[in-house]
Image (cartoon, rainbow, N blue to C red):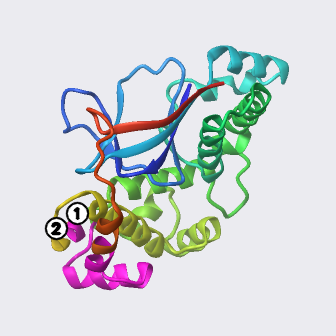
Amino acid sequence: MKLNAQLTGLLEIREGRETRAEKQAFPLPDDVYIIPPGLSRTLVVAPAGDGPATIATLTLSAGTLRRFIAEEDLRSRAPFLRDPYPVLRFDPLLAAMVKAVAAASEVGADDLYAQSAAQFIVAHLLAPHACGSGKAAGSLSSRQLETILSYMRENLAQPVSVGDLASLVSFSRFHFVRCFKTATGLTPYRYLTELRIDLACKYLEHGDDTIVHVGRRCGFSGSEHFSRSFRRIKGCTPSQYRARRSRGRGLTPTGPSGLEPEALTVL
């Protein structure tokens, strides 16, 4: 099993290698791209835009998975690690752990650290909450939240209404807004806007599209809407953001694909 978390740049995930017309999704800082054991389809992680991208990658060996499952008597949960399994998962704790272990490997962390981290990660992946169980009454389960965030991510350039999101989990609009805010701390509109601004920042940093085109690609109805939303969240205009980032951006290439794994740690 491989776990990938975004460090820098803009990434995209798509199915298939022959065409870019396949379904795509953009991972965000708290997402983890999971390649489960025995995956039956081809999935590609690649840079999006003109700039390089950096990821942290961890590999959990089949032996580690089997040993932990046997020692903790978790055989009933083992199917959760097999295909089909969510490929792109919103999981701030797991994303932080992947990045931390990758960083630790760069400074020479020992085997004890690696084994302890591996046990924690496997336990987290197999925990009931990871598969949407343990849902409290009147709340969103982890699986429902993943469904909603995946839909947002895959439709950032398209109009998305509260009704569209509520229908994904069969909630009323009012009940959905309340449950979503409880789960994330933000209203659906604010959360979606922040996702769009996050994506816009990547395009502004790593591409040459005009400000108007970036706004359209990220789902904003016009340049005024884009600029107003960007300023409210980032405290500056898109043009000012691009100018600041361009001054400090390095231009050293990262290899033929532009995709540079920050660290590959085999646990």
Label 1 – label 2 distance at C-alpha: 6 Å
Q: Residue at x 31, y 43 (%)?
A: 47
How many numbered circles does the render carry? 2
Q: Return the residue at label 1.
A: 217
**Which SS class for mark 1?**
helix
Q: Amino acid at mark 1?
A: Arg
199 and 205: which one is in front?
205
Pointers 1 and 2 in contact (C-beta within 8 Å): yes
Magenta stretch encompasses residue 56: no
Residue 201, placed above or below residue 224: above
Q: Residue at x 29, y 66 (%)?
A: 246
Q: Position of residue 166 (x, y in %)?
A: 47, 64
Q: Amino acid at mark 2?
A: His
Residue 261, placed above or below residue 37: below
Around disc 2, counting alpha carbons within 10 Å, would you say few (fewer than 14), some (14 to 19), or many (20 or more)? some
Q: Residue at x 22, y 63 (%)?
A: 217
143 and 65: which one is in front?
65
Q: Position of residue 164 (x, y in %)?
A: 38, 63
Residue 71, placed above or below residue 28: above
- 13 relative to 177 in the view: left or right: left
43 and 55: which one is in front?
55
Q: Which residues are magenta?
A: 214-242
**Which SS class for mark 2?**
helix
Q: Which mark is residue 63?
A: none
Q: Return the residue at label 2.
A: 213
Residue extending farthest to the top is 63
